[in-house]
Image: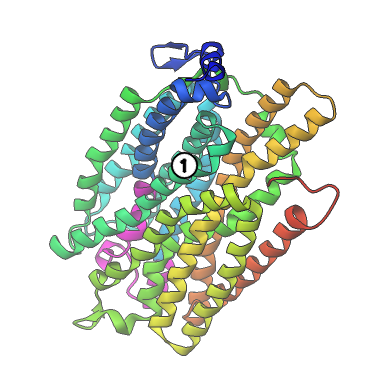
């Protein structure tokens, strides 16, 4: 070790903790990061991913459970009405999850990241136990709606998990860390569909509660691991007026709009894809005259799986090429993929339709990582401007960190609301025309608008442009 390196280690801030509470956290200090920070951050990231993964799975349960539902479970005998009823069952947890993300973000500062992860994981028992109690033949459709809405608590886990992990990592590694955290959670959408496929293929569509028996112990495991292995960081407690200040920041709403297009597409398509295939290409999935849910589930998991696995690549690209550049090209490619889906729908080509939709999942995953990378980058750039204008560097950095944490939660909530819009668009399109064509046209228009907005705010040559976003 050189003299300079030895001096850096000697002068590095030490890791001070009381039990599972870290009193001082200095991720931007290279010596502190090398000595203790990286190890602690990685451990918290691993168990954050576990909790968020289970949360996403519970949130997505009804995207699979609807494949089990027949008129015996309160669903209409009329195919068009039944399709609308099932889309509503997947819309409700998406909507509740979007709303839950705001208080979940604030809860990290109020209770501590570790403490809230334990609580939020435990709350997943409510929708899981409730669904296990009511999913029997003869249940009313109204009861299904109430219980489906309860699954929305799983959607809140993402916002609190991302706000918590954002605290642990230095600026240069936030894109990759947030991408891994989000991707590990997002993959819960694909995993729950694979679990559903396994249950359908073995126990049969008459036994939806087998899925819930699988997830109950996983919920308990996630809560226990968070309690045993995660940490609270004292510096993020008592966050004051962060959300209010974030709401007054124009960049908050620009990024939130972009996240509607990336994450809203991912979660909306994940919840709706099985139903879209079942209704638009029913003839390809028939068995004994009815749509076979095993055949549907056998191909629906791939899109969410790819979109989840590729999300860290979006953060990685954002770290290197810039979040705004990566986001812009993602939206442009998504408009092209949605055009392929529309053409395939009109031509009744299931092969082209499936390829186009799989591309949409992959591109939305890349866009998710890139857009989230933009959040800390935007506020870091604003902090650098403040320092250049004579403001205190430590205060400017702390302000940027607090605003970024608030915007992460706010953008997560608004982005999840995009999933609601996707399901509503499909519901109305199928009710009106029996196809999703109207919805696909709306998606294309939105993606092109997002391209224009990204360029105008972050990439257009301008004296006011933020560097490094």
Q: Is residue 218 visible?
A: yes
In the rendered image, residue 377, in percent from the top left (x then y), is placed at 65, 41
At mark 1, the secondary structure is helix
Q: Is residue 147 visible?
A: no
User: Where 442 sits versus 61, above or below?
Assistant: below
Residue in view at x 42 percent, y 75 percent: 355
Residue in view at x 47 percent, y 83 percent: 345
Residue in view at x 53 percent, y 20 percent: 5
Q: Is residue 84 magenta?
A: yes
Residue found farthest to the left: 202
Please tell me which residue lies in front, 3 or 380: 3
User: Where 55 sits versus 207, above or below?
Assistant: above
In the rendered image, which quarter is residue 197 located in? bottom left
Label 1 belongs to which residue?
Answer: 158
Q: Name the side, left or right, on which 90 lies relative to 237.
A: left
Please tell me which residue lies in front, 91 or 294: 294
In the rendered image, residue 4, in percent from the top left (x then y), is placed at 57, 18
In the rendered image, which quarter is residue 126 located in? top left
Magenta stretch: give its range.
56-85
Residue in view at x 40 percent, y 27 percent: 39
The colour scheme used here is rainbow
- Number of labels in the image equals 1
Q: Name the side, left or right, on which 243 lies relative to 199.
A: right
In the rendered image, residue 437, in percent from the top left (x then y), is placed at 53, 79
In the rendered image, which quarter is residue 106 located in? top right
Characterize the local packing of mark 1: few (<14), some (14-19) or many (20 or more) Cα atoms within 10 angstroms. many
In the rendered image, residue 45, in percent from the top left (x then y), is placed at 41, 34
Q: Is residue 62 magenta?
A: yes
Mostly what secondary structure, the magenta segment?
helix
């Amino acid at each position: 070790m050189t003299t300079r390196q030895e001096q850096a280690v000697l002068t590095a801030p030490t890791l001070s903790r009381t039990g599972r509470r870290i009193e001082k956290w200095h991720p931007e200090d290279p010596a502190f990061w090398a000595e203790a920070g990286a190890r602690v951050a990685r451990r918290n990231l691993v168990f954050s991913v576990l909790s968020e993964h289970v949360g996403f799975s519970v949130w997505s349960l009804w995207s699979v459970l609807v494949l089990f539902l027949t008129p015996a479970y309160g669903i209409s005998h009329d195919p068009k009405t039944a399709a609308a009823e099932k889309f509503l069952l997947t819309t409700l947890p998406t909507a509740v999850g979007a709303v839950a993300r705001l208080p979940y973000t604030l809860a990290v500062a109020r209770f501590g990241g570790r403490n809230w992860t334990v609580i939020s994981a435990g709350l997943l028992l409510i929708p899981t136990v409730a669904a296990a109690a009511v999913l029997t033949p003869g249940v009313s459709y109204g009861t299904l709606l109430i219980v489906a809405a309860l699954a929305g608590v799983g959607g809140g886990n993402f916002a609190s998990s991302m706000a918590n992990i954002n605290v642990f990592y230095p600026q240069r590694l936030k894109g990759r860390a947030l991408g891994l955290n989000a991707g590990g959670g997002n993959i819960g959408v694909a995993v729950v569909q694979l679990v559903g496929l396994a249950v359908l293929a073995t126990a049969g569509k008459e036994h939806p509660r087998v899925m819930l028996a699988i997830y109950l112990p996983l919920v308990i495991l996630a809560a226990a691991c968070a309690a045993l292995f995660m940490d609270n960081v004292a510096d993020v407690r008592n966050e004051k007026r962060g959300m209010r200040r974030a709401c007054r920041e124009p960049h908050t709403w620009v990024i939130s709009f972009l996240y509607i297009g990336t994450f809203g597409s991912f979660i909306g398509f994940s919840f709706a894809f099985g139903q879209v295939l079942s209704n638009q290409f029913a003839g390809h999935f028939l068995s004994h005259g009815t749509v076979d849910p095993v055949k549907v589930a056998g191909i629906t998991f791939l899109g969410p799986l790819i979109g989840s696995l590729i999300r860290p690549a979006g953060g990685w690209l954002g770290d290197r090429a810039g979040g705004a550049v990566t986001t812009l090209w993602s939206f442009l490619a998504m408009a092209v993929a949605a055009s392929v889906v529309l053409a395939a729908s009109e031509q009744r080509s299931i092969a082209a339709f499936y390829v186009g939709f799989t591309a949409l999942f992959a591109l939305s995953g890349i866009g998710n990582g890139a857009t989230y990378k933009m959040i800390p980058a935007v506020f870091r750039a604003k902090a650098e401007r403040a320092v250049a204008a004579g403001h205190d560097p430590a205060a400017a950095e702390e302000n940027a960190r607090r605003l970024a944490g608030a915007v992460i939660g706010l953008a997560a909530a608004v982005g999840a609301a995009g999933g609601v819009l996707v399901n509503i668009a499909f519901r109305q399109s199928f009710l009106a025309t029996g196809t999703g064509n109207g919805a696909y046209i709306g998606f294309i228009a939105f993606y092109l608008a997002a391209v224009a907005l990204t360029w105008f705010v972050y990439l257009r040559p301008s004296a006011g442009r933020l560097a490094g976003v």
